Image: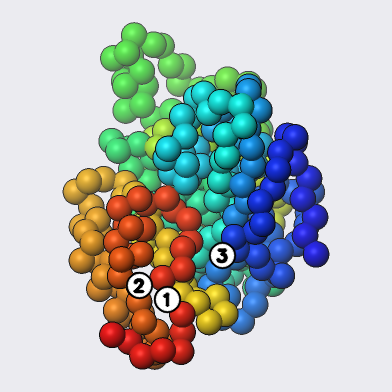
Amino acid sequence: MFSIVMKYSVKISLFLLCFPSFICTSQAASIFDIRENMEIVGKTETIETVYEDTLIDLARAHNLGFTEIVSANRSVNKWIPGEGTTVLLPKAFIVPSNYLKKGMTINLAEYRGFFANGEELITFPVGIGRMDWTTPLGISKVDLKLENPSWYPPLSVRQEYQEEGIYLAPVIPAGPDNPLGKLAMRLDIPGGYFIHGTNKPDGVGMQVSHGCIRLFPEDIRLIFSLTDIGLQVKIINEPFKIGILGNQIFLEIHDTLSPEDINSSYKGVESMIKSFVFDRQTGATIDWTKVKEIFEKKTGVPTMIAEIGTKTR
């Protein structure tokens, strides 16, 4: 049974995707029991806005990042949706391929993290590095945890502020002006990269940082409490995801972080799907018209592209 508490006076549609493993929790992040061969988690919902809503407010209220709620509602005005507008809440996720079963996986392309401890999977939105300060890919580990951290901005960041006419002190103490928020975990990557909270939650789900990974304050509290020194962290860039639920194959496509991304072509999606069908021996007939539509819209919402059990064309 699902238990949903909504902040707004809204109408929730029939679930587009509905999974029995969802655990009702007071935590803002979504928590799921890990099942064998689990590939898709969560559910999508729709709500009707009230006149003062914006998409960034709705994202914050429903633990979604700004980019993912905007992508899922491309026809909706992000700042003035208007009263009574139907907004889709993209709360269903295909789990990234080869995610860490015990550790944290950050998928930059979908602005989302996945924390697994072998029993539960927790997913949450993240803010990532800007185009000129990209978050580095690869596997690392947490080597330091800090409460109420001070921020020591590198010289390059201070110079950037100076070029904009802003003085940035060499040390920013803990407090409301500290961009690290109240909790931070350092990765053993040269350059001083952190997974941390933030004093500006609106930036979660965007390319806004100098390479660090930002979480909502309530999410970093949960993840910080569950993280031990030495936890592995895998940072990936996986804009196209595919997975099976029951006897159906779902496809999830996000905008690539850069137009020059080698993974941005339709041929890349086509190749991925064909390899998936061949490797899994699903015997599925792919709806290539639907695939093309998903690729063009890039909503980031898992969408069915095949029923398993029929011969592949």
Q: Residue at x 53, y 60 (%)?
A: 93
Res 31 quadrant in image: bottom right
Please say which color scheme the image uses.
Answer: rainbow
- Please indicate whether residue 60 sits to the left or right of residue 302 in the image: right
Expressed as whole percent of the image width and height from the top left, the position of residue 92 reads: 57, 58
Specify few, some or many for label 3: CA neighbours under 10 Å numbering under 14, 14-19, or 20 or more: many
Residue at the image position 31 percent from the left and 46 percent from the top: 257
Q: Is residue 20 left or right of residue 213?
A: right
Q: Nearer the viewer, residue 137 or 2?
A: 2
Q: Indicate which label's residue lies in the foreground, 3 or 2.
A: 2
Q: Which residue is mark 2?
A: 287
Asked if the residues shown at circle 2 and circle 1 are in contact, with their CB atoms under 8 angstroms apart, the answer is yes
Judging by the rendered image, the residue that carries numbered circle 1 is: 306
Helix, strand or loop status at disc 2: loop
The amino acid beneath tag 1 is: Ala
Of helix, strand and loop, which one carries label 1? strand
Circle 2 Cα neighbour tier, 10 Å, few/some/many (<14 / 14–19 / ≥20) = few
Query: Which element type, helix, strand or loop, lies under badge 3?
Result: strand
User: In the picture provided, is 172 more to the left or to the right than 14?
Assistant: left
Q: Position of residue 312 (x, y in %)?
A: 33, 87
Q: Is 116 situated left or right of 169 in this image?
A: right
Measure the C-alpha gap from mark 1 to mark 3: 31 Å
Query: Which amino acid, by three-letter code, is at mark 2?
Result: Asp
Q: Which mark is residue 103?
A: 3
For the image shown, how many numbered marks are present on the structure? 3
